[in-house]
Image: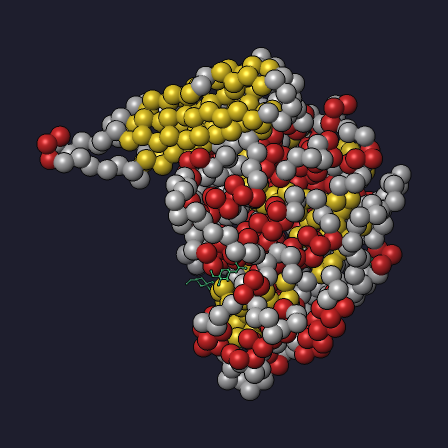
Amino acid sequence: MSFKPLVLVLFLFRLCHVSPSTVGENGHRRTATYIVHMARSQMPASFDHHLQWYESLLKSATDSAEMIYVYENAVQGYATRLTLEEAESLESQPGILSVIPESMYSLHTTRTPSFLGLDGSADMSPESDSVSEVVIGILDTGVWPESQSFEDAGMAPVPSSWRGECEIGTNFTASNCNRKLIGARYFSKGYEAALGEIDESKESKSPRDYDGHGTHTASTAAGSVVEGASLFGYANGTARGMATRARVAVYKVCWIGGCFSSDILAAMDKAIDDGVNVMSLSLGGGTSEYFRDSVATGAFAAMEKGIVVACSAGNAGPSAYSLSNLAPWITTVGAGTLDRDFPAFAVLGNGKNYSGASLYSGDSSLSSLVPIVYAGNATNMTTGNLCMTGTLIPEKVAGKIVLCDRGLNPRAQKGAVVKAAGGAGMILANTAENGEELVADAHLLPATTVGAKNGVAIKSYLFSDPNPTATILFEGTVVGVQPSPVVAAFSSRGPNGVTPEVLKPDMIAPGVNILAGWSGKVGPTGLSVDPRRVRFNIISGTSMSCPHVSGLAGLLKAAHPDWSPAAIKSALMTTAYVSYKNGELLQDLSTGKPSTPFDHGAGHVDPVLALDPGLVYDLTVDDYLEFLCALNYSPAQINMLARRNFTCDPSKKYSLGDFNYPSFSAPFQTTQTGSDSGGSSRPAVIRNTRTLTNVGPPGTYKVSVTSQAQGVEISVEPETLTFTKPNEKKSYSVTFTAGSMPSSTTSFARIEWSDGKHVVGSPIAFSWT
Ligand SMILES: *[C@@H]1O[C@H](CO)[C@@H](O)[C@H](O)[C@H]1NC(C)=O
Ligand SMILES: *[C@@H]1O[C@H](CO)[C@@H](O)[C@H](O)[C@H]1NC(C)=O
Ligand SMILES: *[C@@H]1O[C@H](CO)[C@@H](O)[C@H](O)[C@H]1NC(C)=O
Ligand SMILES: *[C@@H]1O[C@H](CO)[C@@H](O)[C@H](O)[C@H]1NC(C)=O
Ligand SMILES: *[C@@H]1O[C@H](CO)[C@@H](O)[C@H](O)[C@H]1NC(C)=O
Ligand SMILES: *[C@@H]1O[C@H](CO)[C@@H](O)[C@H](O)[C@H]1NC(C)=O
């Protein structure tokens, strides 16, 4: 504490010297940004302060490098520019845990509350006082503070415990913050060290959002209630965040060139110190071991401070192993659809029509049939079917509707390419990979997106008819679409590529065609050719589902201030639903078949049930440390996450299967027996233990297991757990016995504990490798 002024002085001193000089004054020093993790417990007594120690070690490896950031909370260490040789030399010094190259992360680009059952639910509106104590930190592209979603009418003064700031910058002053938007900071030093100075003609060196993504995610998590919100009349209604009375603190970490891990870590470092209760990160890139992933290391420190960290699962679906943000102390959120649609029909000259979706606004010049052409027939390029910039031959598309295939370039850009070539409209066809997923866009010309099946049908018409024609009819907004939710095809899927024993994603939440606040600096398509400005925009991605869960975590934190981040996650997971009201299983848009726990995790969030889960699977910091022991992490690797020495007990047997996670993943090895049994698979047995904590009334819970897994026996011991008082803990074990290797390499089951009122459900995923 008494060192604080020194930290500041040294830090500011350093900043003056952080300049492009580190990028290579002499033109020969090929540097990159590294994050240096320090073992503070090993600081020699001869140093008064750790910064002096950091400096002296850095000087011993290089005389020209300066610290870009010093980290105090998220990790212990700093970021600096080094050559590869300098990094290697530094890493060999005592007291240095590791020197890790910076990595790049990218963004995972009014009806939601009622879809989630938040409207009119008295239970879900804990006294305004407790919610207004909750601060949700959004690490993203910044904020458009003038958005109505950040109006603070009726809000109480800023909580006295809040230590954050409203940083000033270009066109951003302290008066841009208020009682709703209570903090706004920006982190650009890592970005500028790597790519040079920010081009202020393109983006603002301030917390101001020139992209829209950050304003959208922040208003989704905790935006104020705004009546009459819509995008060109689409999705007309009341826009509101999940936790309308919670506070928002914005940390701008993503710039036009991407999001750099040294900046993200600096933002997490500050957010921990500022006093946020929830961190929301709709970005990803970290799929390596947890100690190498800046988001995972920062999230570990946040978890220790009781901060919930929610991250997007990624938009790399529907392929298996496509998830990011896999650490078990992170809440990993996939995306589902809403019951809302924006139908726009492709009507063909043969009288047939095909449904699609669009947010096109404006006069439709397509009041009658016009010729239609396939982009692949109007180009000289092999990728012309994708309507990439400059690939369409104007004479072949002028005045026509052009059918473009989805993929590679942004969807709305394809429309801009058709428009630039003189096309009259566009039908955007999903490929098999996107299936029937209809992501709507605010196209610059009359256009609709159709599913893969309709795309094939329309192509077969236009390849067979000598004079094919079509038009597009726009039908506005439709609600009550069933089935919903459906897992979005783009939502990233398991299994977990880092720790197969931990099931990911954790859950899904709304992430398709979501209406929320937008930046005044960019049009709804995000394209530079789009001159339109909107107060609200409709976009899709796990970037949109993550802040839904961040806001809901804030509501749970307000209702249950004593719950740990793990208890909050458990409540959201064990009450999530996996079937529709009619009993049928949730569907996957990429296949049109039931989705699995590798797609939807524990299921779709149900915030009202999450408030009263009955029992939770809790985890302490020590439990997470034991998890790291079970991963056989070295002392240095554990220190990078825990920021202190923690010694795994060599006499103790650590098991990933006993890690008290609210879901189960059992990866079986297909080991062969000796020749005497003819090489058939040996039965494999996996035994997991779990501990439930009572957070509801006393009661007796009985277990039930449903299984689609043929050849796997599941037994639970004991089958009944009786809780007589609050916070009482009871353990059980579950044994999975696999017989012969099944025909499929994955299968699934579900375990539920119920006292007749509460249902505490967990998915089980089996895999054979
Ligand atoms: C932490 O561990 C390192 C080696 O693993 C050891 O040298 C050091 O003395 C330990 N520090 C403390 C405070 O236990
Ligand atoms: C500054 O912010 C205002 C909103 O207060 C905005 O209208 C204007 O375009 C911004 N100017 C620049 C240069 O970003
Ligand atoms: C939005 O809905 C309201 C009533 O629900 C209606 O009065 C208003 O005209 C609608 N606005 C648009 C742009 O559709
Ligand atoms: C599309 O066809 C269906 C019948 O298949 C019809 O009910 C509907 O009105 C048509 N819609 C349009 C926009 O033509
Ligand atoms: C248009 O493209 C399709 C698919 O590539 C091809 O089968 C068809 O022959 C082409 N038609 C013309 C007229 O070139
Ligand atoms: C496409 O190829 C044709 C025939 O080879 C040629 O005449 C035309 O100029 C080319 N167009 C473009 C845009 O490359």
Image coordinates for residue 218, horizontal then vertical, percent: 71, 46
| Left-right relation of 3 to 572 | right
Quarter of the picture holding the C terminus: top left
Q: Furthest residue to the top?
A: 756
| Left-right relation of 603 to 248 | left
Which sits in the foreground, 116 or 766? 766
Which residue is painted at 25% across and 29% down in the image? 683
Quarter of the picture holding the N terminus: bottom right
Color style of the picture: secondary structure
Which residue is painted at 41% across and 39% down in the image? 655
Which residue is painted at 42% across and 36% down in the image? 657
| Left-right relation of 430 to 77 | left
Which sits in the foreground, 21 or 70? 70
Viewer can see residue 453: no
Query: In the figure, 184 relative to 753: above or below?
Result: below
- Residue 113: name its quadrant: top right
Viewer can see residue 325: yes
Query: In the figure, 365 relative to 382: above or below?
Result: above
Which sits in the foreground, 274 or 324? 274
